[in-house]
Amino acid sequence: MTAEQIDKHYEEIAHQINCMIPEEWTTVKLYAESWPGYSTVYFYYDPVSNTQPILNLDIPDLFSVDPDDTILQKRQLRRTVLALQQLFSEQEMETWTNFTLILNHDGAFQAEYGYEDLTELDPGEKREAWKVKYGIK
């Protein structure tokens, strides 16, 4: 049952991301980080019509979308990702501190989990290191 529950969370995350992106895209790279008292979730996507990846936080500035709706969608995505982490805990699996999901437009995806203590690292440096690791310019 656990694999099915995890897959259901992956599907929901993919659906929510797809709803947040207002144009055709090829690849999405999502990063999430969470431990008691802190969490963050963001993603970059590669639009079909552009070679530059777009950060989800920039969508309201680049497109005619309702900023309030974007905030609600971002919160829902965060809740879904954190529910995935909670599922790990409930199933007595090692609870991750960071999560990367690479999603292709055809539905193929790759999930990677990290378990290291990130509490003392600078958030900006972590983001830049993650971007380098996943080829985001």
Image: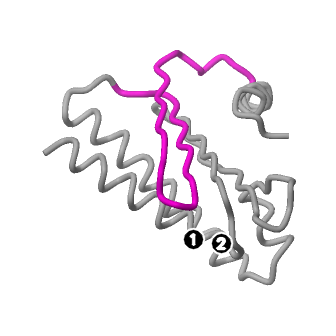
Q: Helix, strand, or loop for circle 1?
A: helix
The residue lying toward the viewer, choosing from 101 and 49, is: 49
Q: Residue at x 56, y 40 (%)?
A: 32
Q: Are marks 2 and 1 in contact (CB under 8 Å)?
A: yes
Q: Residue at x 86, y 62 (%)?
A: 50
Give the colour scheme of this rendering. one colour
> Looking at the picture, does residue 63 appear above or below residue 14?
below
Disc 2 and disc 1: Cα gap in Å? 5 Å
13 sits left or right of 40 in the view? left
Q: Position of residue 10 (x, y in %)?
A: 39, 52
Q: Which residue is mark 1?
A: 72
- Range covered by the magenta-colored residues: 95-122
> Looking at the picture, does residue 122 appear above or below residue 91?
above
Q: Is residue 65 magenta?
A: no
Q: Is residue 38 visible?
A: no
Image-quadrant location for residue 137: top right
Q: Residue at x 36, y 45 (%)?
A: 84
Q: Is residue 104 magenta?
A: yes
Q: Residues within 10 Å of mark 1 (few under 14, many from 20)?
A: few
Q: Residue at x 80, y 62 (%)?
A: 58
The residue lying toward the viewer, choosing from 9 and 61, is: 9
Q: Position of residue 11 (x, y in %)?
A: 38, 59
129 sits left or right of 85 in the view? right
Q: Is residue 124 visible?
A: yes
Q: Which residue is mark 2?
A: 70
